[in-house]
Image (spheres, rainbow, N blue to C red):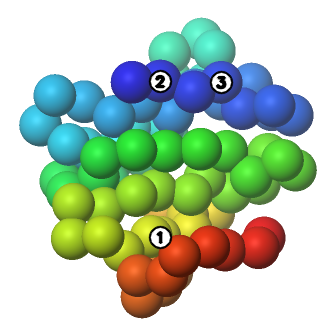
Amino acid sequence: MAEWNPEKDLLAMVTEDSKVVLHRFNWQRLWTISPGKTSLCWHPDGKGVVLGLEDGTVSLDDVEDPEPKSFERRDSFVF
């Protein structure tokens, strides 16, 4: 699975081993986040990526700082 950033030259991909890899369009790797991710979606401003995790939680990751901000499982979120 892969998603292009709506505002920046970035591509986020979930690998077969559930890692999230962030690349620039020239394929320069910016960071890799550890396993356990199952889905992703870019924030509309392009500054963050929302990741669904295997345990039902959601994390919001800043493209400049891949340290996740995790949230408990909820029915809906507003960003």
Give the vertical position of 24 relative to 51 (above or below). Answer: above
Tag shown at residue 7: none
Q: Position of residue 74 (x, y in %)?
A: 49, 82
Instruction: Please name whichever residue, 22 or 55, is drawn nearer the observer in this view of the structure.
Output: 55
Residue at the spot of label 1:
59
Asked if the residues shown at circle 3 and circle 2 are in contact, with their CB atoms under 8 angstroms apart, the answer is yes
Q: Name the side, left or right, on which 54 lies relative to 70.
A: left
Tag shown at residue 4: 3
Q: Position of residue 54 (x, y in %)?
A: 21, 60
Give the vertical position of 44 relative to 52 (above or below). Answer: above
Q: N-terminal of the two: label 1 or label 2?
A: 2
Q: Amino acid at mark 1?
A: Ser
Residue at the spot of label 2:
2
Instruction: Please name whichever residue, 25 or 4, is drawn nearer the observer in this view of the structure.
Output: 4
Mark 3: few/some/many CA within 10 Å (<14, 14-19, 20+):
some
**Residue, x 74% and y 52% (percent of image)?**
43
